[in-house]
Image (tube, grey):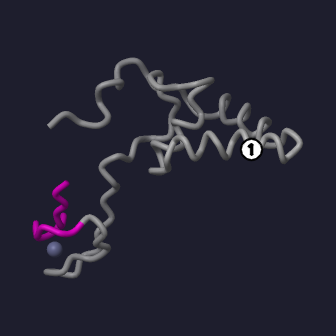
């Protein structure tokens, strides 16, 4: 994935935080980043885990395992947090299903 400085256009490695040519701070989001929402595709229960993993770049299987393990060992606290996220995180709108990631 090509990655460019927004100021001078220099090609940069994906891990760059500053432009090597002009020194500008590089704040571009990863190409996989999506807004925090519950996708309609790929969900297991309510889409909370896959929504969090897509928004923050985490591995969805790791999030799911941690959710289940956390539920078992927290006395249900994680389950309550899951339900709160189910209510609080908006569902992916129908019209943006193909908007992320952008087709190139
Ligand atoms: Zn630059």
Please state the horizontal and vertical placement of residue 85, each as a whole percent of the image.
67, 36
Q: For this rendering, which residue is in front, 24 or 80? A: 80
The residue under label 1 is 69
Q: Residue at x 28, y 69 (%)?
A: 26
Q: Which residues are magenta?
A: 1-13
Please state the horizontal and vertical placement of residue 27, each as a whole percent of the image.
33, 64
Report which quarter residue 16 is drawn in.
Answer: bottom left
| Crowd class of label 1 (few under 14; some 14 to 19; many from 20; radius 10 Å) | few
Q: Quadrant of the C terminus?
A: top left
Q: Is residue 62 left or right of residue 14?
A: right
Q: For this rendering, which residue is in front, 74 or 24? A: 74
Locate ligand 1 by image quadrant: bottom left
On whether residue 12 falls in the magenta region, the answer is yes
Q: Residue at x 18, y 64 (%)?
A: 6
Helix or strand or loop: what does disc 1 sit on?
helix
Q: Residue at x 53, y 25 (%)?
A: 43
Please state the horizontal and vertical placement of residue 76, each as a whole percent of the image.
85, 38
Please state the horizontal and vertical placement of residue 21, each as a whole percent of the image.
13, 80
Residue 100 vertical placement versus 59 (above, below): above
Report which quarter residue 95 is drawn in.
Answer: top left
Q: Is residue 80 left or right of residue 4?
A: right
Q: Residue at x 18, y 69 (%)?
A: 12
Q: Quadrant of the N terminus?
A: bottom left
Q: Is residue 61 left or right of residue 98?
A: right
Residue 2 vertical placement versus 73 (above, below): below
């Amino acid at each position: 994935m090509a990655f460019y400085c927004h100021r001078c256009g220099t090609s940069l490695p994906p891990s760059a935080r500053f432009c090597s040519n002009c020194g500008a701070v590089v704040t571009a989001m990863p190409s996989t980043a999506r807004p925090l929402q519950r996708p309609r595709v790929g969900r297991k229960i309510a889409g909370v885990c896959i929504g969090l993993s897509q928004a923050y770049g985490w591995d969805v299987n790791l999030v799911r395992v941690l959710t289940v393990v956390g539920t078992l060992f927290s006395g249900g606290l994680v389950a309550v947090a899951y339900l709160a996220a189910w209510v609080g995180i908006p569902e992916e709108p129908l019209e943006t299903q193909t908007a992320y990631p952008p087709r190139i």
